[in-house]
Image (cartoon, grey):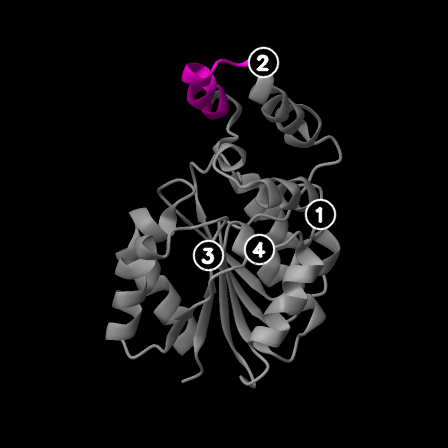
Amino acid sequence: MLPLLILPGWASDVKRWQPLTGMLRQQKVSVQLIKVPYDRVRNTADFCFWLKNKTKNIRNFYLLGHSFGGQIAINFTAVYPGKVKKLILVNSAGIRKKVNIKRWLVTPLAQLSKTLIPDEYKSFFYRLLQATDYQRSTPVMKQILRKIITEDQQKNLSQIHCQTLLIWGKDDRLTPLADGRLMHQLIMNSRLQIISGRHGLPFTHPKTLSRIVINFIKA
């Protein structure tokens, strides 16, 4: 069987993936969790080129991307179609609306909070804005966030032709189900599977996710 490469979401803790990767390995799946680098400022296309170099010795593989990892996976699969045998997107980022509230309001407010909000209230403020990713980020990562949050992948989605499985938590608030439905429409050879849960399905539903993934790649 071809290897399964996993691109985790934004600054994801590798340890949180161990239950899922362990279950996949129990079913004889060769899993590689690829740690995404945040050492310098990159946009999605730059991350795509990084992944090309990272996988230069692997002829082709199954690719799973969660959240921001999904955004990279979309770009990569569209640009290098021969590398990806099957694509799995779990609560993927990549749909950017023309009027992006987080781009025009949340991120500037998060930046201003450094001087306007007392330290003891900053955590609550970031949670209120759903901008905890920004709060926990290094200066370089904050620059990356400001780039990737504007990059829409709809054109790349329409250029994906390999078998694609979209797995979505029906109560996801960060990448809402409407985004999954739109991706399903844009990817011709795709299937959308909706399950209970929110954005962190790899951590909250590892057993369900491993079963769905195994059935897909072995079909």
Location of mark 1 (residue): 152
Of marks 2 and 3, the one in the foreground: 2
Q: Is residue 187 left or right of residue 167?
A: right
Magenta stretch?
Answer: 117-127
Q: Pointer 2: what residue?
A: 116
Which of pointers 4 and 1 lies earlier in the amino acid sequence? 4
For marks 2 and 1, give the one nearer the viewer.
2
In terms of sequence position, does the residue under pointer 3 or pointer 4 come before the other?
3
Vertical relation: 6 (above or below) 182 = below
Q: Secondary structure at mark 3?
A: loop
Choose mark 3 or mark 1, whichever is in front: 3
Depth check: 165 or 119 in front? 119
Residue density around tag 3, few if under 14, some if 14–19, many if 20 or more, within 10 Å: many
Q: Amino acid at mark 3?
A: Pro
Q: Quadrant of residue 101?
A: top right
Query: At x 46% / y 66%, what residue is drawn?
Result: 34
Of the residues under marks 3 and 1, which one precedes in the sequence? Answer: 3
Q: What's the CA distance linking mark 3 and mark 4?
A: 16 Å
Query: In the image, which disc is placed on residue 16?
Result: none
Name the quadrant of the C terminus.
bottom left
Residue 200: x percent and y percent? Answer: 39, 45
